[in-house]
Image (cartoon, rainbow, N blue to C red):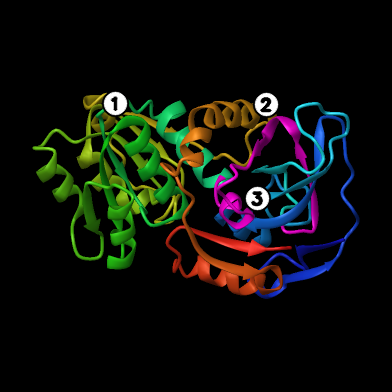
Amino acid sequence: MKGIIAKEPGGREQLVYTEMPDPILNKGELLIEVHAAAVNRTDILNREGKTGYASNPIIGVEVAGVVTDTNGHHSFSVGDRVMGLVNGGAYAEYVTMPANRAMKIPDNLDFTEAAAIPEVFLTAFQTLYWIGRLSDKESVLIHAGGSGVGTAAIQLAKVLSEAFVITTAGSDNKLNKCKELGADVLVNYKEQNFAEQVEKVTEGKGVSVILDFIGAQYWQGNLQSIAMDGRWVLIGVLGGSTVDKVRLMDLMAKRIQLTGTLLTPRSDQYKAELTTDFSNKTYELFKIGQLKPIVDTVFAIEEVQEAHKMMEENRNTGKIVLKVK
C-alpha cells in the first residue's frame, strides 16, 4: 500500500507518498480501507519530529473509511463505514484502528465530512465537558473560533448546553462562520481587545470556561476574562509557551482551575471511553444535522504538502481533509 511519511524531520517538502508495508492487524483492532484523512497540527509536529509519542512512520491520526477485516470483533462487520482516531498511519490506503475507538458514520455524511469529526470534536468535547465541566446556560470564551476545534466547540456548547459563547478569530470570514454556528459575541483579535469585550458583555463577571489555544500571548487577557471559580483549559501554545512573572495569587484569588491537556498522547483506554461518551451524546445530533462537520478544503492525498501549507498559514476555517480514495 501507499502512505505519507516524512523522509527526514523538517518542512512540508519532506512529505512523500510512497510504498509502505501493509499494517499488521492486532487483537481488538479493525482494518480500515481509508477513504479520507484529516489534517491536524499534531501532524505537523510529527512531520517536524517534535513529538515523542509517534511510533508509526506514516503520519495522521484521524480517518474515515470502510471496514475490510474485523479480526473477529463482533461490534462491526466488513463493509461498515467508520470514522475515528488511530495511533498514527492515517495518511495511507489502509490503517488499523482500535475497535473500541471506531464510530459508525451517520448515513447523511460522506467520508470527507466524517474524517472532519473525530479529532476536533473529541478534543472540543473533552475540553468543554470532561475538563471544563460546562453546564447549561454558562458562558464560555472559545479562542481560535474558526479553527477545526473552535468550530466544533461552538456547536457543542450551543447544542448541548445552550451556552453563551464568546469567540475570537482574526478575519471577518472566520467570524461570520462562527456566527453561523451560533456564537453570540464575535471578537476580531486583530482589531479589538478580547478581554475588554468579555468584561463588557458579561457585565464584569467574566466567563465560566475558557478554551485556550494561544497560551502566553493571551495569559493576561484570559486572567482578566475568567470568572470566579472559572475553568481555564489550555490546549495549545500558538502564542508562546512561556509566561514571565506569573503571580500565583492572581489564580488563587479567583479560585481558577487551570488545566493543560493534549489528546493524541492519551492512553488507548482514555480515548475509547471518551469516544463512547461522545458518540452516545452526539450520534443522533449529527444524523439530524444539529451538529455538522465543517470542511474548508479537500486535497487529493498527493497534494499533502499544499494541505500542510494551508494549515501552517492558518488560512482554513474548519477542517482540511485529504481524499485518499
10 Å crowding of disc 1: few (<14), some (14-19), many (20+) = few
Which residue type does callout 1 highlight? Asp
Identify the residue under disc 3.
51
Q: Position of residue 26 (x, y in %)?
A: 87, 35
Whether residue 191 sits left or right of residue 241 in the image: it is left
Mark closest to the chain's N terminus, 1 or 2: 1
Identify the residue under disc 2.
269
Say the numbered circle drawn on residue 136.
1
Between disc 2 and disc 3, the foreground one is 2
Q: Is residue 223 above or below residue 1?
A: above
Which quarter of the image is occupied by the C terminus?
Answer: bottom right
Q: Are marks 2 and 3 in contact (CB under 8 Å)?
A: no
Q: Position of residue 318 (x, y in %)?
A: 46, 58
Q: Is residue 132 above or below residue 316?
A: above
Q: Is residue 55 above or below residue 271?
A: below
Mark closest to the chain's N terminus, 3 or 1: 3
Chain part drawn in magenta: 91-117
Q: Are marks 3 and 1 in contact (CB under 8 Å)?
A: no
Say the numbered circle drawn on residue 250.
none
Q: Secondary structure at mark 3?
A: loop
Q: Residue at x 67, y 31 (%)?
A: 267
Whether residue 52 sits left or right of residue 246 in the image: it is right
Residue 245 drawn in magenta: no
